Structures are given as C-alpha cells and as structure tokens.
Image (cartoon, grey):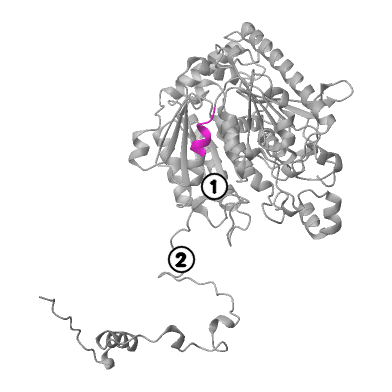
Amino acid sequence: MPPPALSFPSFDPSTNPSSLANALRAINDDRHIPAPSAVRRPSADNSPYTKSLSPPIRQNSGSATPRVRPHATTLSIPGMTRSLVSPDGRIADRDVAAKLVIVMVGLPARGKSYITKKLRRYLAWQQHNTKIFNVGNRRRTQANVLSPTKPTAAKLVDTPTESGASTLNGGQSDSHTVNHSPSTPENPLVDHSAKFFDPKNSEAFKLREEMAIDTLDELLDYLLCGGGSVGILDATNSTIERRQHVFDHIKAREPKLGILFIESVCKNPELLEANMRLKLSGPDYKDKDPVKSLADFRERVKAYESAYVPLGDYEEDHAMQYIKMIDVGKKITHFGLEGFLSTGIATYLSSFNLSPRQIWITRHGQSIDNHFGKIGGDSELTDRGHVYSHVLYNFITKKRKEWLIDQKNKIAQSSFPPLPGDKSPPYPEINEELDGKNTCVWTSMLTRSIETAQHFEADEDYDVKHWEMLNELNAGKFEGLTYDEIARDHNDEYVRRQMDKLHYVYPGVGGEGYLQVISRLRDMVREIERIKDHLLIIGHRSVCRVLMAYFMDLTRDDIADLDMPLGVVYAIEPKPYGIEFHAYKYNEAEGWFDEIPDYKPQKTVDRHA
C-alpha cells in the first residue's frame, strides 16, 4: 500500500514574510522558485559596495561605557605582532594586565641574583623593558650614605657582570639594576653583619621591611609610569608574612598587575659551597678576611633559616602563581602560571645549567658574494674562505685541548674554605668528567656556512648540524644586490633602513628584519643555555649580532650596529658569576688567530652594514 500523500498547510501571505510564503507555495503548487538570474538586483549605481566608505568611528559595542574589564593579554612579540595600541609589538602601557612583577624568594647564597640577571638579560633581549630592583643594594647604599667613615657618593646602579660592555663604544645605557639613595636619613646606621638579619632584632626587622617596600614602590613606578614591562624584586622574601605584604601592596597600587614568585632552592652541597664562596667577593665582604667573612655569612644564613618558609601550600591556597627552581634548573615545579611572560619564563629557567663549557661564535669564511659586496644569496666560499675554514678548525681544536688542561689545573688547585687572597669560586660540578665533553658545530643551511665547517665535518670528534634558523637575515627583493645599488635604485628604502635598522624589514617575499631574527633565535638561545657540551656557531652577520647581543647584554639600540666583521672568533665561557669573554682576530698572513686584548664591543664603521 503506497504511503499517504503528504499535505502541507497553506499560509496566509499577510501573516508571513513574503519570501517564506513564496517558498511554501512553491512546494504546495509544485512550482519552481525563480532562477537566480530572474531575481532583481540593485543597480551598480545603488550598490553600497561601489561607494567609498568612511573609516569606522572608534566606539564601544559592549554593554558598559566606558569599558571596565581589562583588555586581553595575548602574546606580544616585538616585530612579530602589532596592534593599534602597540605598533611595535611591545607590551603597551595600556595593557597593565600583561605586565609582570617577579618576586624572588630564597635564602642567601641560593643563586637568586644569578637567576635575576640572566632572566633580565633574556627578557630585555626579547625587547621587553625589564629592570632589577635589589633590596640588598638599597641596604648597602643606605649604610654608605649614613656612615661617617664612608664616602657619600654611593654606587646606585649595578653594571651587568655578564657582559664585557653594555653599550657600544662606551656609550651610556639604561640602568638594569636600580636602587636610589634612602629617603629616611634619620634611620640608624645599617649594619651588614649577621645580627642585622636576626628575626628577633625588631629595629632591624622594621628597617628591612621599610627598605623592601621602598624598593617595591620604585619597581611599581617603573611599570606603571616608566614604560616598563617586567620588574624583578630581588630579595629573600623568605616568610609568608613578607610575601603576603608584598602581594597586597602591589594589588593595592594596581590590581591588574601580574605577580610571579620565583624561588631558588639549593640542595646540592657543592653548589651551596660555591655560592657561599662567591659571596665573599661581593660588596658585603669585599677586601675582608675570607675566613671570618665566611663565618659571618653562615650566621646570616642561619638567621634567615629560623623564619624561612618555602613556597607551597599557602601560595596555592591563595591562588598565587609561582615557580620553584632546585639546584639552578635541575628540577622545576610551578603552579597556576598565567600569561605569556610567566609561561615563557618557566621554559627559559628550565634550560639553566652551570656546566663548564665554551661557546664560540664566528661568521663564515669569505664567500663569492662577499667578494663582490652583494648581500644575501647562497654563494660558495672563495679560495681565501676555504683557507679560513681550515685555520678555524686547527685553532678550535687547539683551544679545546688548552681549555681541558686549564680546567683540570683549576680543580687541582681549588680549596675550601678559601685562603686569604683566593677569589676564584669553583664550579659546582667540580667532579664532572671533563674528558667526556663533546664539541658541537652548528651552521646555517647556506652553502658558505656549511663549507666553513667542512673540516669539522670530516673529523668524527665533532658533531656538526645545520640549522635553518641560523640562516642570514633575508633581504627580500634586494637579495643579491650591493648596498650601493640599493642606495642608488631604492633610495627611499635605503634611508628608511639607515634611520632604524632594528625595526626595518626588507620589502619583498620573505623579507626580514632584526626583530624577526631575534624571534626565530629564541628557541636556539634556550638550547644553547641547555646543552653542557662545547659549541661553535658558524653564522652570518645579523645572526652573530643577535647572539652576541644576548651574551654581551647589549641594549636594543646596539644590536643592529654591532661591528661583526669576517675573520673574528668570539669565545664565551659561562661562569657562576656571569661570563668570561675573549675575541680573536684572523691573521691571514700567519695562518692563525691573534687575541684582541681587552676587547669591547664596538659600533661598526661600515656605513652600509
């Protein structure tokens, strides 16, 4: 039996939209909807799409005017992101919720200052305005100002110890570590000895709290009024009460600011001994008897230990985000991380290690394009470039052997407790098997870089790898041209680059700028920090500039102008207190490298480069 025919109710057109009524009638009457070509369209003269439109007026489409909720705090990468409020990609002053206060936590000699300096260097290299605010520096400054036996012109700013120089050609840079003269000269003379840090010393406790809050206020001024993105409060902050006080003070000033606690814990006795020894050459004990100084410092640590409470349950119960580092990166735990800065910091901190090693950076040998003054390209080495590659191989091989002998001699001569006049701290990994270290050689994927590594590639004792992220900055449609040709045929672009090389991006497909190179080298820097083997990087001018800017702690204004000629090898040796740095210039006539005494980074004299 066939199914019953379907019937559709008829609709009164007066009570339904005409289009719907027509469609329903078409179904009932088995009629077809008119073909699209039969549908009347507005004439071109009446079409809104053919008329020029005025730009939209900025408004608020939300229910509240003005807007009350904070703006989104998504990833900001200078050179890779931009917005109306941040055309250069840096964190906008308006986006307070994206800014971050880092509060260090930990007992003395746990590596807090080491961590803060490396962290500031990394964040500043990423083009985030970052400064350290050190409470200990304020205490020492106040003692110097108030002491009748000490000069009143106290040093207010710490020079970064990681770098050979913070600006090119001796220029003045922005302060990285900040503290000012005390605003309360009526306070009693600040004592540096262990009794000042005794929790039972009520007067000293009150003074320490005042100095901590004064320093924190400077940090907040920097973030809220001084264009800062990240401020680091470097102090022990070893009690729950102090941390809660700091937290409340920040939120009372600006509730949208992010707060991240970072605690450094040392469980390795050798690492702790090395840190304590390093303190003896610091400002509190410099030029004093090292044995007596060590005893006093141990008493100071005991004073802190009596009231110390590590990060943990309290912070988690009160939704305070934190990162805890154990033995400078051996183990890391974190809780409630929010925001791209906090998560990026956790990743960076996980790459730390104190293993003794050497990092070498150099440009490739002379290429055919170098010979003709052309930029970019993928040309081969000249004969002179091939000779350079062989001399480089012999030089690095010799330096490896010298370094190994030197390290073993230092281990044999080290002593603890230190003897009078003994200032060099031992490596914490003093018993590591130094003979087992590999030497990695990293090149770009461009021919001139790969050919410079050919002799290392032929030696099984080296591990060679080619990296695309080490490729030279892409000059876009100017690849293969000389700077003179660009200046002649594209003068407007040439002038734009000369005015602001850091932010300039070459036009054309694939064109890059220095900020793009910094972004693509972010993961490589973390890998360099992570590995414990020796490393030689055979790169290109822009890549070497960016890497050197990270290790030498250069300002953003220096990166694109750093002198980076062919034929110079830079040796970087990470230390617990920063880096040891040497530079060697290729002596083509002698077929070797000569050390450049007291090398400091210089601004290039090449008007094009």
Q: Is residue 75 above or below residue 435?
A: below
The answer to whether residue 131 is seen in the rendering is yes
The residue to which callout 1 is attached is: 220
Give the class, few, some or many, for how many residues have Cα within 10 Å of label 1's Cα (few <14, many ≥20): many
Task: Classify residue 290 by image quadrant.
Answer: top right
Outermost residue toward the top in this view: 412
Give the class, few, some or many, for how many residues have Cα within 10 Å of label 2's Cα (few <14, many ≥20): few
Q: How many marks?
A: 2
Q: Magenta region, mostly helix, strand or loop? A: helix
Magenta span includes 515: no
Where residue 42 appears, x then y in whole percent?
A: 50, 88
User: Mark 1 or 2, which is nearer the eye?
Assistant: 2
**Dot 2: element:** loop
Residue placed most toward the observer, 6 or 235 = 6
**Cβ atoms under marks 1 and 2 closer than 8 Å:** no
Q: Amino acid at mark 1?
A: Leu
Where residue 545 appears, x then y in whole percent?
A: 72, 38
Indicate which disc, 1 or 2, sits on the residue closer to the N terminus.
Answer: 2
Is residue 479 found left or right of 345 in the rendered image?
Answer: right
Where residue 311 appears, x then y in whole percent?
A: 40, 32
Task: Classify residue 418 by image quadrant.
Answer: top right
Alpha-carbon distance for marks 1 and 2?
24 Å
Span shown in magenta? 345-352
Q: Is residue 60 above or below residue 159?
A: below
Q: Amino acid at mark 2?
A: Arg
The residue to which callout 2 is attached is: 67
Q: Quadrant of the N terminus?
A: bottom left
> Residue at image x 59%, y 33%?
118
Q: Is residue 98 above or below residue 387?
A: below
